[in-house]
Amino acid sequence: MSSPAGIAEAYAHCEAVTRAEAANFFYGIRLLPRERRRAICAVYAFARRVDDIGDGPLAREEKLRLLDAEAVALAAVEPPAADPLPEGDPVMVALADAYRRFPLPAGALGELIEGVRMDVLGVTYERFEDLVLYCRRVAGGIGRVCLAIFGVREATGVDSASAETLADELGVAMQLTNILRDVREDAENGRVYLPAEDLRRFGLLAPQDARTVPQALAALAAGTGEGAGTGAGAGVAEDAGALDLAALVRFEAERAREWFARGIALTQLLDRRSAASVLAMAGIYRRLLDRIEADPQEAVRRRMSLPAREKVWVAAHGMLRGGG
């Protein structure tokens, strides 16, 4: 069984991973009390590991094998597992301790694994509702885990199921923002998250062109003029294709705003420091969404981000709004 010193070292490792990799989340996480901050860093470090498997260069079969291994490791630390704390793997040591300190919902992190498995298998999305299922798995589950760490103020009178719904919706909003931020990068890697029905709605996809959607979107984003097919499958001129893609990005950005508008009500159920943390994280993503919506053509040509000084400002504003 891991010693207290070993557990502390494991948490320190997870915090280092979060600080280095979670450019947006860490600005909010740092506002939390120590115990909650450590637990969320453990969750993030596990999520980062799973995401890295899906995004890495390994063959599909090896990725699926590694995801299966992570699912087994997760099952060993989730309730009702009664095993002693694991040793050797700092992420699992910290995560196991977090499960013992907070009522983290069993199965929520397993949903993340299943979502990444969808990436590995190359799942595409016909309807927006199909995409929402993916977003709930990779981000909504994380939102529900974070909610368990934050805790809901008893004075609100809101039941846990309603609070989890809000956390789930905020997670979906952030994931939709990620998808819009990464349209070109994902397309270049052979992935398309935008629903096929929306691609057709904006003239960027004909049924017979489905296999070349990633290449077509990447070409449009790069401004090569090799657009996706429309109508009978003919190529789209560069200007027309870019305009259609920009219109699609604005359309999806408005959808993300609707999810933010609903999910942000979660902050009313949290204590001051937890609310400040969520407002900081959500605020950074909403400002990123603002930039994407204001200049969608630029957004699909490069991966947009906020400068560090702006993130600090948003975090400070979140602290003030949260009353911390």
Image: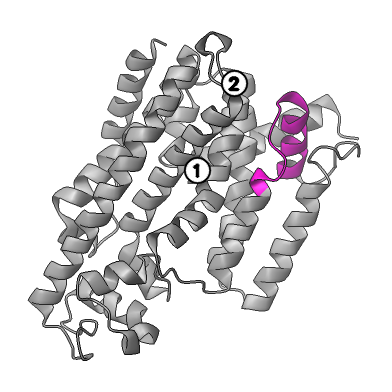
- Residue 104 shown in magenta: yes
SS for dot 2: loop
As for residue 159 lying within the magenta part, the answer is no
* Residue at 78% from the left image edge and 41% from the top image edge: 78
- Up/down of 211 relative to 286, above or below: below
Q: Amino acid at mark 1?
A: Ala
Give residue 285's quadrant in the image.
top left
**Label 1 to label 2: alpha-carbon separation:** 26 Å
Which residue has dot 2 on it? 151
Label annotation for residue 275: none
Residue at horizontal 73 percent and vertical 69 percent from the top:
65
Position of residue 69 in the picture relative to residue 316 (left or right): right
Residue identifier under label 1? 20
Q: Residue 99 lies in what quarter of the image?
A: top right
Question: Could you tell me if residue 128 is visible in this image?
Answer: yes
Q: Secondary structure at mark 1?
A: helix
Question: Magenta residues?
Answer: 91-109
Residue 298 location (% of width, % of height) = 17, 59
Q: Give the quadrant of the C terminus.
A: top left
Q: Main secondary structure of the magenta part?
A: helix
Q: Position of residue 266 (x, y in %)?
A: 45, 26
What amino acid is found at the position of numbered circle 2 in the picture?
A: Gly
Front residue of 253 and 222 = 253
Residue 159: give x, y in percent of width and height: 58, 22
Please report the residue visible at 61 percent of the width from the left and 74 percent of the height from the top.
58
Q: Is residue 145 left or right of residue 321?
A: right
Q: Mark 1 against mark 2, which lies toward the viewer?
A: 2
| Residue 153, above or below 22 | above
The quarter of the displayed image where residue 248 is located: bottom left
Q: Position of residue 200 (x, y in %)?
A: 26, 74
- Label 1–label 2 contact, CB within 8 A: no
Label total for image: 2
